[in-house]
Image (cartoon, rainbow, N blue to C red):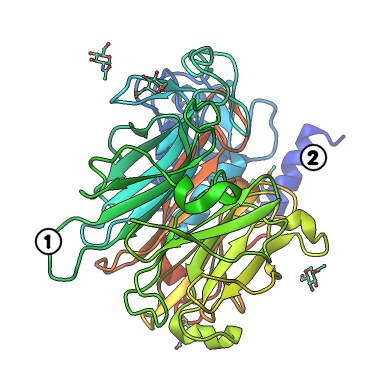
Amino acid sequence: MKSIASALVCAAVATGVALASRPEGQCAAVADAWCNAQRPGAPSPINCDSSVAEGPLVTLFDSDAQGGPPQWRCYSRETLNPSRTKYVSGTGYCTRNSSLTDELRNCAAGITTNPTPVFMHGETASNTNTTYPCIRIPSIVRLPESDELLAFAECRRWVGDGCAPVGGAPDDADSTLGRTDWRDVCTKTSTDGGRTWGALVVIANCTMQPTPVVIPPEAGTSQPPTIVLHGNRCPASTVRPSGNVQIVSRDGGKTWSQPEDLLRFLGPDVDGADVGPGVGLRLDSDHPVAPGRLLFIGHRGAYVHDFVWYSDDDAATWKVSDTSTFAGMDEAQLVQVPAHAAAALGAPAGAVMANMRSDHLNKSCDCRAFAISTDGGASFSDVRWDSALISPVCQATIISGASPSGNGSALYFANPASKSQRAQGTVRASFNGAASWPEARLIASSAFAYSCLAPPSAHSPEPSLGLLWETDGGSFQCLGPSCRVVFSSIPTALLAGSAAGSPGPLAA
Ligand SMILES: *[C@@H]1O[C@H](CO)[C@@H](O)[C@H](O)[C@H]1NC(C)=O
Ligand SMILES: *[C@@H]1O[C@H](CO)[C@@H](O)[C@H](O)[C@H]1NC(C)=O
Ligand SMILES: *[C@@H]1O[C@H](CO)[C@@H](O)[C@H](O)[C@H]1NC(C)=O
Ligand SMILES: *[C@@H]1O[C@H](CO)[C@@H](O)[C@H](O)[C@H]1NC(C)=O
Ligand SMILES: *[C@@H]1O[C@H](CO)[C@@H](O)[C@H](O)[C@H]1NC(C)=O
């Protein structure tokens, strides 16, 4: 083991800079906000231990009480010199090198991540007063005219499965409340592009796998969009455990119908397929085969079979697709391949792609599987593998949205870009219908599990993707990569390739 003195010398030589440093420019305030982020009513900052003293923490790249090499840390003021530029003594700090490195890299690139989570274990629903020890499985849509963001999740009355609150109330105070198999669908709304979010509201009791799709209003009308959300009854349901249901909002997400059973459309072989998670697909209004068709994909059993169902009458009735090629597939998403890009896939305009969790089936790639439909999602090709989209055992998200160069639509994909870990959360762009993924941006080097992308706003001068993603609990008494759900805004210009500089950093 090296002596402390020689370790310090090595660090100084290796970095070639003064040992203590503050983040640069406006990113200092962003890092400080991360260090000090607080959940309302909670005793200590979310990202830093309760052992740290009261008062705003200061972000510095500096040493610790053992004289160790400098790392990014949140320091309480009494540990610093009077000008707060240097660590002096004491243990009132927490070392958050990897998370703060992510924050600072994202900040420098113009990516913002709210320091306050959208969903976090221990939150209470405003309309039912139920407190949930875990909230997982993020989903997000952007409404077409208002640009409102609607986030959905499973509010779970039990713990585990990537979210394991330990010790200290209030986080585990309610684990006695519920049955281990009980989940409710919850939502929150943001009217300011994801900077702030409204109250937690339960919209479907004993329901899971929230997977919405938006039907835009008829052009020229001022009606709010309709949102059709498919899910499954929770396993504890006394009505029909795991059965597929839909709820509908005709007022832009303010009120929702009661769950409607889909058994009579799906039949006993497909009913019970866990939908999504993520979002459903609405084909373009000028789609050559099935304009305005709504589609959902779901999996029955773990890696057993995927099914697709669709509606040509705005969710009044549903038909089941031919997915006989989807044996062994799991959680999946559907996307319409942008018209100009379909040819690169050897497919006609309007092709639909299924992108599926399947990695254990093909150990030579540990990647996402995909299949193409040329009949609007009524039937699909054989499954192939996309070796560019490496994946651990995890869900992923894929959408189409305005291309960064304004030359039509691009495909955007996000997942943990690792073959083995729920980490290295990365967003990618493809301009040729997923034939290649030339653009990638690392968002989170540490915990990143389930995620969902929202397309860029059509009205913003600086269009940004929304990304709702699961990460760990910070210091907040919860173990696992899915203790909280956070929102990031990612300018599409960062994924424009030569149009806006070099591809973003992507860890190997
Ligand atoms: C801390 O983060 C910096 C980048 O910000 C990195 O260069 C360094 O290796 C990290 N140190 C440790 C001990 O992980
Ligand atoms: C929630 O609890 C508060 C305080 O106990 C009470 O005032 C309110 O009516 C309750 N709301 C519901 C929906 O039960
Ligand atoms: C949820 O369903 C359970 C069982 O059917 C019922 O006891 C409970 O009151 C319901 N809660 C709400 C908020 O509807
Ligand atoms: C596994 O994926 C690779 C692409 O990385 C592909 O070449 C290979 O054919 C696939 N294996 C099977 C058994 O399909
Ligand atoms: C659209 O722009 C992207 C770069 O943002 C470029 O790679 C792609 O080739 C363009 N597509 C068309 C059809 O011009």
- The amino acid sitting under disc 2 is Ser
Point out residue 243 in the picture as x, y percentages from the top left corner: 51, 40
Which residue position holds label 2? 6
Helix, strand, or loop for circle 2? helix
For the residues bearing labels 2 and 1, Cβ distance under 8 angstroms: no
Query: Could you classify mark 2 by the number of other residues whose Cα lies within 10 Å: few (under 14), some (14-19), or many (20 or more)?
Result: few
* 445 or 353: nearer the viewer: 353
**Number of the label disc, if any, that sits on residue 222:** 1
Point out residue 492 in the picture as x, y percentages from the top left corner: 42, 68
Helix, strand, or loop for circle 1? loop
Which quarter is ligand 4 in?
A: bottom right
Residue at the image position 51 percent from the left and 17 percent from the top: 178
Point out residue 299 in the picture as x, y percentages from the top left corner: 61, 51
Residue at the image position 26 percent from the left and 57 percent from the top: 147
Visible residue check, residue 84: no
Q: Quadrant of the C terminus?
A: bottom right
Which callout, 2 or 1, points at the residue further toward the start of the chain? Answer: 2
Q: Quadrant of residue 370?
A: bottom right
Visible residue check, residue 217: yes
Q: CA distance from mark 2 to mark 1?
A: 69 Å
Residue at the image position 38 percent from the left and 83 percent from the top: 407
Query: Could you classify mark 1 by the number of other residues whose Cα lies within 10 Å: few (under 14), some (14-19), or many (20 or more)?
Result: few
- The amino acid sitting under disc 1 is Ser
Q: Quadrant of the N terminus?
A: top right
Residue 122 drawn above or below residue 471? above
Q: Quadrant of residue 459?
A: bottom left
* 111 or 142: nearer the viewer: 142
